[in-house]
Amino acid sequence: KAYTIIKSRILSGYYEPNTMLNEVALSDELGISRTPIREALNDLEHEMLVNVLPKKGTQVSEIDFDVVRDIFQVRLLIEPYILRKFGPYIDKQQLILIKGIQQKAEVTGIEEQFESDNDLHQLIISSNPNRYLDESIRKVYDQNQRLRLLTGQKSTKRLIASAAEHLAVIDAILVEDYDEAAQAMEVHLANSWRATLDVLFQK
């Protein structure tokens, strides 16, 4: 319970990057004893969502240039690979539903677009049957969720451009051209990487 609540609050942005988490305060806030709180924080450290700082406490991990780079490097390696290798396993009916929402990007709300964007990427990565690959990408997506919260509200234009890129990926999958889908995904991720850097680090 402690792990689930604290992780959810980190991923939702309730605990922002660099926030110090105090075991005593968390214990009081969540109504959970300190031992499971400590164990939860240790688990979250292994997932790189918090850093345990000697003599200082536990800090929600920072989102800096290196983190953004690492996230997108891994996504660029894995997501196109999944499309090329496991594209035939992607549920086409679900894909068509997602396509309908992406086609309305200019008129639908930000939250709906966020959800549809996430649904598309999750649908693609869920087609991968490799358990080790799956564990790696899930950890990266936890970090990516934090990025989306930090950048999404600041870049509505990027959401619209992103929808067009998603449609290129979707259309290629629907005609079973998985190499083309992978190339379209590479373009999308490269553009998203640049947009994220612009939003977070532009002076």
Image (cartoon, rainbow, N blue to C red):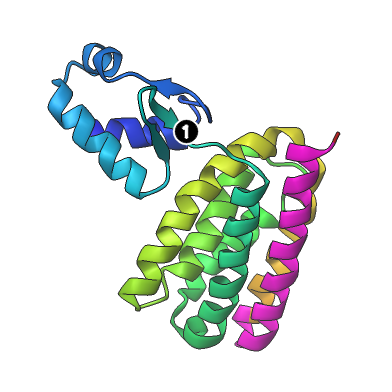
* Image position of 197 with respect to 138: above or below: above
The part of the chain drawn in magenta is: 173-202
- Give percent across and percent down for residue 39: 20, 36
Residue 198: quarter of image: top right
147, above or below 5, in the image: below
Q: Is residue 25 or residue 10 the one in the foreground?
A: 25
Q: Is residue 27 above or below residue 61?
A: above
Query: As rendered, which of 148 and 87 lies closer to the eye?
Result: 148
Residue located 33% across and 31% down the image: 6
Q: Residue furthest right?
A: 203
| Residue at x 52%, y 28% (from the top left corner) | 18
Q: How far across and how far down the image is residue 87, in percent? A: 51, 82
Q: Residue at x 66, y 79 (%)?
A: 181
Instruction: Verify whether residue 128 appears in magenta.
Output: no
Above-or-below relation of 119 to 112: below
Q: Position of residue 17 (x, y in %)?
A: 53, 30
Magenta segment includes 197: yes
Q: Label 1 is placed on what type of residue?
A: Ser
Q: Which residue is mark 1?
A: 12
**Looking at the picture, how far across and down is residue 151, in whole percent?**
68, 38
In this orientation, which residue lies closer to the viewer: 139 or 102?
139
In which quadrant of the rendered image does the N terminus lie? Answer: top left
| Circle 1 Cα neighbour tier, 10 Å, few/some/many (<14 / 14–19 / ≥20) | some
Tag 1, which secondary structure? loop
* Dominant secondary-structure state across the stretch colored magenta: helix
**Residue 183 in view, yes or no:** yes
203 lies left or right of 179: right
Residue at the front extreme of this rendering: 55
Residue 109 visible here: no
Relative side of 74 to 142, left or right: right
Q: Residue at x 35, y 42 (%)?
A: 45
Quadrant the C terminus occupies: top right
